[in-house]
Image: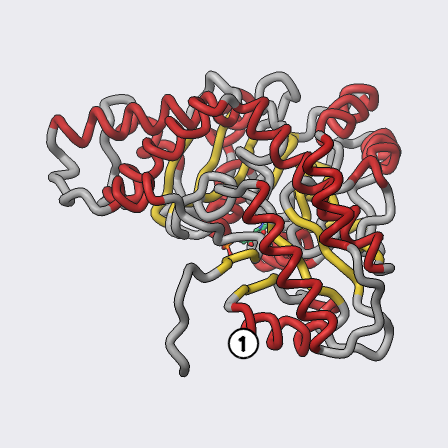
Amino acid sequence: MVAKSGRHFLQIPGPTNVPDRILRALARPTIDHRGPEFARLAREAIEGLQQIFKTTGPVVIYPSSGTGAWEAALVNTLSPGDTVLMFETGHFATLWKNMAARLGLQVDFVPGDWRHGVDPEVVEARLAADRSHAIKAVAIVHNETSTGVESRVAEVRRRMDEAGHPALLMVDTISSLASIDYRQDEWGVDVTVSCSQKGLMLPPGLGLNAISEKALLASKSARLARSYWDWEPMVKDNKAGFFPYTPATNLLYGLREAIQMLLEEGLDNVFARHDRHAEATRRAVQAWGLEVVCLNPDEYSSSLTAVMMPAGYDADGLRKVILERFDMSLGTGLGKLKGKIFRIGHLGDFNDLMLAGTLSGVEMGLAIAGVPFTQGGVAAALEYLSSK
Ligand SMILES: Cc1ncc(COP(=O)(O)O)c(C=O)c1O
């Protein structure tokens, strides 16, 4: 392996680049997680997360990846044999569906083409047809990281209300939280699932659930087996700033710093920054003569852009060239999109010049890999960035 100078460009759609401020916070000495200093840290982190999720309800923090937070959402609220309405928006929606089935839930999985988000009309129709209220939860992925397609959560909520159905609404915000507008309480979401390594700019290691009152109530009678993921001891101990088991102390230092950074910038500015970088990226893709995976402009993701390769060209071959020549990692195609697409992550700690570097790496890589395309994507992105 040849030694590389300069910084690696980590442009996968998470884990994202961890800013120096957070790295320094993570490097503080580990403290007693049953002492007073820790209680202050935990309370600040939890209160900060409530601002990020836009909720006044409890937020629990697991030492886990996002997959653990998925499991926590299901096992705390549902019972064996309950029906969950889920949508095949892509790879992650499919994995969550597989988990629900393995846990003993019945999944009504609405098929999809991996190029569209959840259709709110289908949500309403499915719920309206469910007169016996067999469906106990609607579980959707806000931002499908495998495709760069965003689902319209507020609209899904509105359609659920229109159907007058009591199902819980669960939303995976793993690649949208702190990058794309999200409002747990206003949108009436019952459980929001998220984690540390994307918009929160932290290393992997924290799984999050934001919980509504209705979900807490459901957890009192839910009968799926749960132990590690049980909300009850978490919520109880968190009130005093403690955890029922050893928390990820140093990640909480990082989390507190990340929240401070996001609030200093202002969440609306954070979202606008992501929207702008996403638009610049799409302009580059269009100028290259390539196609984005997302087919509906109302569902474009602001945290990543997934790009289709021309037929007969291998996306992972292109990614390999870009990694070897320019020390930049791009996201691979997942599941049935393996080899067919690559994904550009533009979320987290990111600015105009980082985007310019990222798109330059892609444009040079396309040329080196011999992929048919038109030069000028970087120029199109720069023109947009300098005019806005
Ligand atoms: C939308 C979405 N959901 C769930 C997951 C799974 O999270 P983890 O890999 O942290 O377990 C990911 C991972 O990238 C994701 O993007």
Q: Residue furthest bottom?
A: 1
From the image, tell me which residue sits under label 1: 324
* Image side of residue 148 versus residue 53, left or right: right
- Res. 227 visible in picture: no
Q: Residue at x 40, y 48 (%)?
A: 18
Q: How many marks?
A: 1
Position of the N terminus, as image quadrant, is bottom left
* Image side of residue 259 versus residue 310, left or right: left
Q: Secondary structure at mark 1?
A: helix
Q: Residue at x 53, y 39 (%)?
A: 193
* Image side of residue 306 versus residue 9, left or right: right
Colour scheme employed for the rendering of this structure: secondary structure
Q: Is residue 47 above or below residue 242?
A: above
Position of the C terminus, as image quadrant, is top right
x%, y% of residue 75?
A: 50, 44
Q: Quadrant of residue 155?
A: top right
Amino acid bearing label 1 = Glu
Local crowd size for mark 1, using a 10 Å CA cut-off: few (<14), some (14–19), many (≥20): some
Q: Is residue 37 above or below residue 253?
A: above
x%, y% of residue 13?
A: 58, 53
Q: Residue at x 54, y 64 (%)?
A: 328
